[in-house]
Image: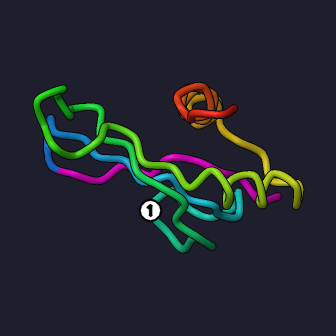
Amino acid sequence: MVIIRLSRGGSKKRPFYTVQVADQRRSNQGKFIERVGHFNPMSRDSDPSPKLVLDLERVDYWLDKGAQMSERVNQLYRSAKAATPGS
């Protein structure tokens, strides 16, 4: 099964996550099919970089193909959809 999930990166106590489409049997740090965004929970409002960047078109494409989202990615996806004007 294909799953859309977070993969942790960054340094100690400074997490940075990439949103990846991968085979469920693969390791979180292993091979993936496609990177569809990133999430930086440590980003502050004063930072120029956004907290969440997500390619909604690609996520929708993978969902149409039968991919499943992890709980956390589902929450991020819903918040990104709500923040998008015209949705």
Q: What residue sits 60% from the left and 25% below the top?
A: 82
49 sits left or right of 58 in the view: left
- Which quarter of the figure is the N terminus placed in? bottom right
Query: In the rendered view, does 78 fall on the left or right side of 54?
Result: right
Q: Which residue is mark 1?
A: 29
**Left or right: residue 60 compared with residue 52:** right
Residue 52 is situated, as x and y percent measured from the top left of the image, at 39, 40
Magenta span main SS: strand
Q: Position of residue 7 (x, y in %)?
A: 44, 52
Residue 25's image quarter?
bottom right
* x, y percent for residue 48: 16, 43
Quadrant of the image for the C terminus? top right
**Residue occupying image coordinates x 37% and y 47%:** 17
Magenta-tinted stretch: 1-10
Q: Observer-nearest residue: 58 or 5?
A: 58
Instruction: Say which amino acid is labelled 1.
Output: Gln
